[in-house]
Amino acid sequence: MIRLLIIALFILQTLAGVAQTNNAYYTSYDKIITGRFYFSQKYTSYQYRHDNESINIRYRPNTTLNMGVGATYKWATLNLAYGFGFLNRDEEKGKTRYLDLQTHLYGRKIIVDAFGQFYNGFYLDKGELTPRVNGYYLRPDIKVRFLGASGQYLFNHEKFSYRASFLQSEWQKKSAGSLLVGLEFFLGRTKADSAMVPSTLSGQTEETNLDQVNFVEMGPNVGYVYTWVIKKHFFLTGQATVSLDYGTNTMTSNGVNTRSSSFSPNSSLSFFAGYNSEKWAVSFVFVNKNIGIASGSERRIDFNTGNLRLNIVHRFVPRGKTKEVLKDVIR
């Protein structure tokens, strides 16, 4: 299954670069290097809700704010970042060990968001426990494994550019929007050494002794994206997508497995804002995906994953040996 997912992503990435541009609406800088300095913070969270027991908790990881550099040339993008100590001093929330691989391929016709996330160690915010406790409630034993991808077709690709908002390798000069239609696939696991619902919560019953969740789901999605251009250089972009996935999940409580299958609505939201010009660009990026696991009329589990990012971009023409190497490697 993972091999098929990788092949599909490769095909979608290839198709993403095949399309015509409309220079009246946006300009492409495919033959120019788009260099960037950026700050980024990725995240994933696990939320458990039980209406009858009045339980609503969200486990969050203590992820780092990363600082890095990157570049885009034609279809290829490479970013390198690191969470330096002077940017991250929030030790009160415990320690999270994680590998978060997120790929957002914004072609002219095809949009692909792919995730590969491996998190160990979470915490609950202050005030989520009853009775309240001092400090954060730490759960270093909770582990989350999450893989998935979403692919969408951009109908109005002749007038609308996703690259202009996210990568700044293009410049949207006139306001435009587009309908999005596609498919998505997700699978994951959450596991803990003991019940994920703390014993200090009032109203706890045997049903809340959940310590492991496995799920897989797939389904169609539909959405809309629009960029509002102000005085040619400033832009605001919003994107919203809803889906109806069908999935199977297995809940484990006290060593007993309960399996169920059902439809589950999911959603994704993206927001981009900034300034764009021929050589310089600045942008703020927010990308969020919500994956819900329907496990009964009273109980629901949600995964939220996304990225917050600030980009400072400068474009320049490759020269000399750099130009020759790029021609040989990236065609």
Image (spheres, rainbow, N blue to C red):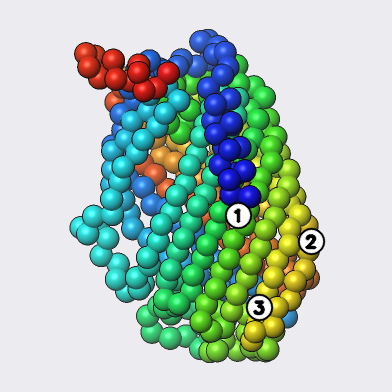
Secondary structure at badge 1 equals strand
* Sequence-first disc among 2 and 1: 2
Along the viewing direction, whichever of 305 and 143 lies nearer the viewer:
143
Q: Report the Cα–Cα distance between label 2 and label 1.
A: 17 Å
| Residue 141 drawn above or below residue 103 | below
Secondary structure at badge 2 equals strand
* Sequence-first disc among 3 and 2: 3
Residue that lies at the very extreme toward the front in this rendered image? 3
Q: In this image, 10 relative to 99: left or right?
A: right
Which residue corresponds to mark 1? 290
Q: Which quadrant is the C terminus positioned in?
A: top left
Badge 1: how crowded within 10 Å, few (<14), some, or many (20+)?
some
| Residue 217 drawn above or below residue 286 | below
Q: Amino acid at mark 1?
A: Asn
Which residue corresponds to mark 2? 262
Q: In this image, 211 relative to 297: left or right?
A: left
